[in-house]
Structures are given as structure tokens and as C-alpha cells.
Amino acid sequence: MDGTVLIADDDRGIRTVLTQALTRAGCRVHATGSLSQLMRWVGDGAGDLVITDVMMPDGNGLDLIPAITRTRPGLPVIVISAQNSIVTAIRATEAEVFDYLPKPFDLPELMARVRAGLERRAPRPTPAPASPEPVPDTAALIGSVPAMQALFREVAKVVATDLPIVIAAEPGAGRSTLARALHLLGDRRGGPLVTLSPGELPAVLPQRLAGAQGGTLIVEDPAAHDPATQLRLAALLDAPDPTAPGARLVATTGPDPLADIAAGRLHPQLYYRLAGAVLALPPLRERLDDLPALARLMLDRAGGTGQELAPPAMELLRAHRFPGNLRELDNLLRRLSLTAPTPVIEAAQVALALAAGGPAAPPRPDPAQPLSDTIEQHLQRYFDLHGDELPAPGLYDRILRECERPLIQIALDASNGNQLRCAELLGMNRNTLRKKIADLDIQVTRRRRVM
């Protein structure tokens, strides 16, 4: 490679590694831990390519990109950052940087991108510096594993377009969070955000679409909608009002919407109207290297500032399959934040919390056995797991609170997602059930039984 590379990173080790690798490759290198020094070099006309970190002692590297572009149009900039969030990826894309790599990065990959940048060296238009509205760093929006970084790149490409989006993922993986983020980070963030949930009647669809004009319409689990509703919605989307501003369409589906089509649960006419682009959100078991960052975020959000997981406790979490994905992890860490007696959460406490959250492969109960006997067996096992110690105080309210969500979820599944039937089964008012579903963040899906 031939050219001069300017490096700005506050990590001396990274500066040294990059300097040595680029020098061996034939480049001339200037490295600094200061953005102001980087900008002086750029202003003096030095350098054929820039590599900059984001969080620096004297500022934010992304904020510097417009000034670099105004001073040196066409100077390629590669951003590297440990701030592995969807917001960082989108800001890098909006700033029209040459490339963006999360830390820790693969050195050969970075070298290949430097080579491509040095070979390009062509003028480009000055970008308009745009900073998206802040979005909370929720677990669905952070991640350094390749699958999450690939997702962030795809989001950055489509967020400012009107292309309809399908977010395909397992329940609990963060589909709704990502759908809301697409609204908040896009050009329609000043407009309304309307959610169309399963169970809506076809007659209300025109009003819901009208209410989302100029904003975003989130269609939750289209396969769970009544077939007549699916067809009615597809027809309305095919014939929009030409005088209205329209709505950005974002749909959340299961991990394999094509399987839903094949099984007859999802009408293809609706799906292909919604699937301008498909964003696949990986389940938690496929992003376990993100667990430390996720745990830190969730513990802080639960009010456990200063709490942390001991290394053996983290390894125990890595060994768990997390069928409930991020929602299960979040609930688990909320419990641990409240019950852990010390700031450092040990493996034994994680094991107890996992056991209390749902033992693996429980024995099938006898239908003739009184329900109280089954509950007593589970409670006794919970006490037995504590050995000679007693559970944390507040057990009565905690047990009642933690039983409510799985009871409603299982009742909904048994009722095939029919909320009226579920309310009758539970013996509660339908409005009360709807409020509990919203408060407990329960996903409602309709399923067809396979005999």
C-alpha cells in the first residue's frame, strides 16, 4: 500500500498495533490521541486516509467528520468504535464515512478497508451533518458480534427510506424495540407512531392507517391476525390515498415468515406488501459474546448501579439457552438486582434464579392431581435449593408477581391468542387482561394446532 494514514485513538496499544501493521504494509503513519491534533494535520493537507475513534478525551470523532469533509473533500475516513450501538452505526452512515468497524476489530479486515480507501481517493459531496434523535441503548440496539453489526449496517441503509420493513425474530429478541427505533431514528420521527396488534377488526383498519399518516405503522405479528383482517389490510396498503402523506410500514414476525406462509398462517399478499426489506434479529443464544455488555446495561437499568456478575456467574449465563431471549435475561437480572445481598452477584445466586424462573423439563403433572399440590411441589423445590438458608425477604409478593406473567402467557397460548376466550378462562374482565398484557409486555400470537 502507498499513502499516508492519520490515526486518532486514545488507546496507545491500538495506535501502536495499527502503526506497526500499516508501516509494514508500506504506509507512512501519523498517530495521535487527540482530535485537535488530527484536525491540524488534516488542515495542513497531510494524510491520504483517516482512522479515528469515536469517544476521545477532547471530543467525539463522529462530530468531527463534517469539518474534515469541508476541509478535505474526498478524504476517506474509517471510524472505529467500542460504542457498538445502532445509533453509532447510523451516525457513521449519515456522516458518509468511508467505513465503520466496531471494536474489537479484525486487523486483516481493517487493513483491507484501508487499502480500498487509499485506492479510492475520489471527491465526494459534502454531507449535511445530521444527528438522529437519541434512542435509549436498549439490549436490542447494542452488540459487537458480527450478526448484530451486520444488522446495524442494514438498518443504517434503510432507516431514512420509505421502504417497508419486516423484522423477523423470535419472541423476546427485541422486535418491538427495533421497530420503534426505526421510527425514532428515521425522517418520520416527528409523526405519529401507531401499532396494529392482533385482534383488531377489519373495520378499524382505515382509521388506524389514517392515524399513522406522516409517521410509522407497526404491524405486530401479521400471521396472528385474522385471515379476513390480513386481506383487508393488504387491500388498503395496495390502494393508498394519493392525497395523504402515507405511513412507513414496519412489521414484526416470527423468525421464519416464509414458513408461516407455507403453513397458511400468513397471507403472501400481505407479507410481500410489507417485506420491502427483511431485518433478521438474532436470538440471544447466537450473541452470547454480547452478554457482558447486555448484563451491564440491564443491571444499571434495574437500578443496580455498581452491581456486577462474578466471572463464574457470567459463565453460568453463557451456558443457559435463554428460550425467552432478551426478555428472559432482563427479568432474571431484575430479580438478581433486587435479591442479591452483595454488589457482586455470584454463580450460586444465578443458579437459584434460573431454577426459580423455570426448571428444565418438569415432570408432566397428573390432570387429576389438585393444582395446589403441583404448586406446593414447585415451592418446596425452590426452598430446598436454598439449603439451610431462607429465600430473600418479600417472597409472598415476589411469588405472586412472578406467577402472573407465565399464567397469562400460557392461558393466551391455550386460547390460541383469543383475548376474549383467555379472559373468560382466567375469570377477569377483557380490558383488565389487555392492560396486564401491555404492562407485562406479553407477546400475543395466534397459533393453529397441528394434530
Image (cartoon, rainbow, N blue to C red):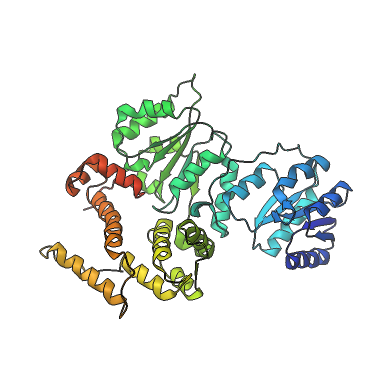
Q: Residue furthest right?
A: 44
Quarter of the image for the N terminus: give it.
Answer: bottom right
Q: Which residue is at the front of the view, 210 or 304?
A: 304
Q: Give the residue drawn at x 21%, y 53%.
A: 451
Question: Residue 33: x and y, percent?
Answer: 78, 60
Question: Residue 12: x and y, percent?
Answer: 75, 66
In the displayed structure image, the side of residue 151 where residue 436 appears, left or right: left
The answer to whether residue 449 is visible is no
Q: Which residue is at the front of the view, 280 or 83?
A: 83
Using the rendered view, name the quadrant where residue 224 is placed: top left
In the displayed structure image, the side of residue 316 where residue 232 appears, left or right: left
Question: Residue 377: x and y, percent?
Answer: 20, 70
Q: Which residue is at the front of the view, 322 or 251?
A: 322
Q: Which residue is at the front of the view, 413 or 60?
A: 60
Q: Is residue 39 above or below residue 123?
A: below
Q: Is residue 238 above or below residue 421?
A: above
Q: Residue furthest left?
A: 368
The answer to whether residue 199 is visible is yes
